[in-house]
């Protein structure tokens, strides 16, 4: 425009052209002003819609709780709180108790954490301190991608590849080796089926491993390098820096990440269903087939023919939801606290 | 004053350091080896079972040739439906958290509950939809399957949308507001546009997440042996077919299950990689 005006002064540019530009500009401005006016009128609507969408998230959560509670009323009326500690599970006579499934869920998750937590932290230490710089990104990305592989893949692999291998090469020698050892002989005894509670725990641990490693690595990276440098400056070894500076500083985050992983392990369905063996009976041996809450629901829900059977399975779902809620809520509070700390 | 170096202590510290660093390297090798085993087995078994008929024939009875066409169609349809319904809700809710609600108590509660829904067991989602859709309708249906996937899509989209909108510098919002643009105009033509790549990331992650979900479909869309396009009848899906065929006693069904597993994993990994690239672009 300035150029145009300059040219006009010199009598070089066609006035009509300048006029057209002005008109185009005015049109454009008018149009924008119009859409803004419309937007201003629509502001309460838009704001309301976003609010409703946010409210919908809460509605979903409350809806899940209400629907599951309603669905489990028949079973709760019939069995009362004893449902929680009754081991019997007899669809034929309609006697149901969730005890063996609850124990199965807790034991498999515990086993998974027992393996995955130290190994996951080890991987995080390797990635943040030891790994050559050029390898860090590829390994980091590989781990993050693997955390996203659907659990049914771990399930099918566990059933067809891992369980037969485990039965032949590990389970049989272990059973023989511990046959006469007091406590371990019972825990790791019995028949080598390949599938069972122990296998389910191992598959779960492989599944949550990338998750723990990724979260822990991210938390380790938030530790100010000044702290680490100070420790190194005092002559600490790498291990001493990790153990006495990095891990204490990052413990809230590591704990939060571990709880998040535990929440996943507790609710994990497909990876467990394939390999746990689906036996509603508590066995002193970890190698014996067992069941978990999610595996029971996945296996039996479509076969449940009576109201009470279905309701018992939904009650188990409610129990699972409740347990994971507590674990995940703890994880959230831990990680929130960390975020606030990092924000300061 | 003499400086004595305690050689014994020094050697011990070095040894402990060596042992633990060796252990953590071992941990990394251990983890990667297992994961390599899984992907290796998947490739070996899956590639063997790949054939063109996989995409043209429906799931067969045992002993006859067949493919996964109906399951692929079902998975794609239900996932698409879930994304089409879930994305706008998730986008709007995420926008509320990042733009309007930010520090309110309500937003805090929504954020907290959303993050719990994000990792809540997906089988519970299936039970929920069973109670509110399948039971009143009296039968399993593709609608119920899609609905259970919507419940999984929403928290993923909410979380990424909020995170990505918070990355948009406040200066942009202030500049637009200073020109007299009303709030929603700023959001729609400035903030959303600036966070475009990030928002698409969230949607892709959600698709990746639901394309492998099995548990919520088991008792909502169930399964269907035949090619079915109706939304009110049961519909096959890849994960459910994998589940049923893998647990069957037939070898040809096992092969189909492996082929399906390979397809699902390839889809999920491709989507996650694209999502990662987009997210990196957003963050830079």
Image (cartoon, coloured by chain):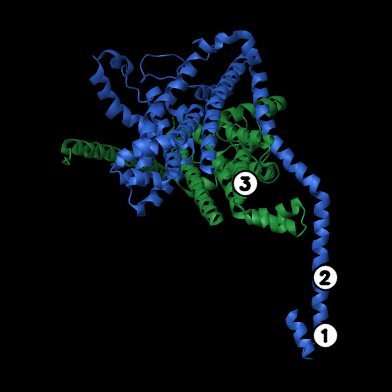
* Image quarter of residue B43: top left
User: Dot 1 lies on which element?
Assistant: helix
Chain letter, disc 2 residue: A
Colour assigned to chain B in the rendering is green
For mark 3, what is the residue? B161
Please state the total of marks drawn on the protein image: 3
Where is residue B105 drawn, in percent x and y? 67, 34
For mark 2, what is the residue? A26
Mark 2 and mark 1 in contact? Answer it, CB < 8 Å: no
Query: Who is closer to the viewer here, B246 or A211?
Result: A211
Q: Which mark is residue A15?
A: 1
Where is residue A72 drawn, in percent x and y? 63, 17
**At 83% from the left edge and 54% from the top edge, which residue is drawn?**
A38
* Image quarter of residue B122: top right
Chain letter, disc 1 residue: A
Where is residue A95 drawn, in percent x and y? 55, 9
Query: Who is closer to the viewer here, A344 or B150?
Result: A344
Q: CA distance from mark 2 to mark 1?
A: 17 Å
Colour assigned to chain A in the rendering is blue
């Amino acid at each position: 425009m300035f150029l145009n005006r300059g040219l006009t002064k010199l009598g070089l540019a066609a006035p009509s052209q300048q006029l057209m530009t002005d008109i185009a500009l005015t049109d454009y401005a008018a149009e924008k002003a119009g859409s803004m006016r419309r937007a201003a009128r629509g502001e309460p609507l838009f704001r309301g819609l976003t609010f409703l969408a946010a409210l919908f998230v809460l509605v979903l959560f409350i809806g899940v709780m209400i629907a599951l509670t309603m669905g489990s009323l028949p079973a709760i009326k019939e069995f009362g709180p004893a449902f929680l500690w009754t081991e019997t599970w007899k669809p034929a006579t309609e006697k149901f108790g969730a005890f063996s499934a609850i124990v199965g869920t807790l034991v498999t998750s515990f086993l998974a954490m027992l393996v995955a937590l130290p190994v996951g932290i080890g991987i995080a230490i390797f990635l943040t301190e030891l790994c050559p710089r050029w390898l860090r990104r590829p390994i980091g990305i590989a781990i993050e991608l693997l955390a996203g592989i659907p659990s049914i893949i771990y399930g099918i692999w566990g059933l067809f590849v891992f369980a037969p291998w485990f039965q032949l090469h590990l389970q049989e020698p272990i059973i023989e080796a511990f046959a006469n050892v007091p406590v371990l002989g019972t825990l790791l005894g019995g028949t080598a089926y390949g599938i069972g509670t122990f296998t389910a725990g191992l598959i779960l641990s492989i599944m949550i491993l990338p998750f723990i490693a990724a979260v822990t690595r991210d938390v380790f990276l938030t530790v100010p390098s000044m702290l680490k440098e100070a420790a190194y400056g005092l002559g600490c070894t790498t291990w001493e820096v990790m153990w006495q500076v990095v891990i204490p500083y990052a413990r809230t985050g590591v704990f939060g990440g571990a709880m998040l992983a535990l929440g996943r392990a507790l609710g994990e369905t497909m990876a467990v269903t394939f390999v746990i063996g689906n036996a509603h009976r508590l066995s002193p041996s970890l190698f014996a087939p067992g069941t978990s809450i999610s595996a029971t629901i996945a296996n039996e829900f479509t076969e449940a023919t009576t109201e009470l059977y279905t309701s018992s399975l939904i009650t188990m779902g409610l129990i699972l939801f409740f347990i994971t809620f507590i674990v995940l809520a703890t994880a959230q509070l831990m990680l929130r606290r960390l975020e606030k700390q990092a924000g300061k | 004053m003499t400086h004595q170096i305690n050689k014994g202590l020094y050697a011990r510290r070095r040894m402990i350091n060596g042992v633990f660093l060796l252990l953590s390297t071992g941990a990394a090798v251990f983890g990667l080896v297992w994961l390599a085993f899984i992907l290796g087995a998947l490739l070996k078994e899956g590639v063997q079972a790949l054939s063109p008929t996989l995409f043209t024939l429906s799931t067969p009875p045992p002993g006859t040739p067949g493919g996964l066409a109906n399951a692929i169609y079902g998975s794609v349809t239900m996932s698409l439906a879930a994304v089409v319904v879930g994305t706008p809700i998730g986008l709007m809710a995420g926008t509320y958290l990042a733009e309007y609600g930010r520090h309110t108590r309500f937003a805090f509660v929504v954020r907290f509950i959303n993050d719990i829904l994000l990792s809540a067991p997906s089988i519970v989602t299936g039970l929920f939809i069973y109670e509110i859709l399948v039971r009143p309708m009296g039968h399993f249906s593709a609608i119920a399957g899609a609905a259970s996937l919507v419940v999984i899509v929403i928290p993923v989209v909410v979380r990424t949308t909020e995170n990505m909108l918070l990355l948009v510098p406040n200066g942009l919002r202030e500049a637009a507001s200073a020109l007299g643009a009303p709030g929603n105009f700023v959001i729609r033509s400035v903030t959303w546009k600036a966070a475009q790549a990030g928002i698409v990331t969230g949607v892709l992650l959600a698709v990746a997440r639901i394309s492998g979900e099995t548990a919520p479909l088991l008792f909502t869309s169930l399964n269907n042996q035949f090619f079915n396009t109706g939304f009110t009848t049961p519909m096959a899906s890849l994960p459910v077919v994998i589940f049923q065929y893998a647990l069957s006693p037939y070898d040809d069904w096992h092969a189909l299950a492996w082929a399906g597993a390979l397809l699902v994993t390839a889809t999920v990994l491709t989507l996650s990689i694209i999502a990662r690239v987009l997210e990196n672009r957003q963050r830079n």
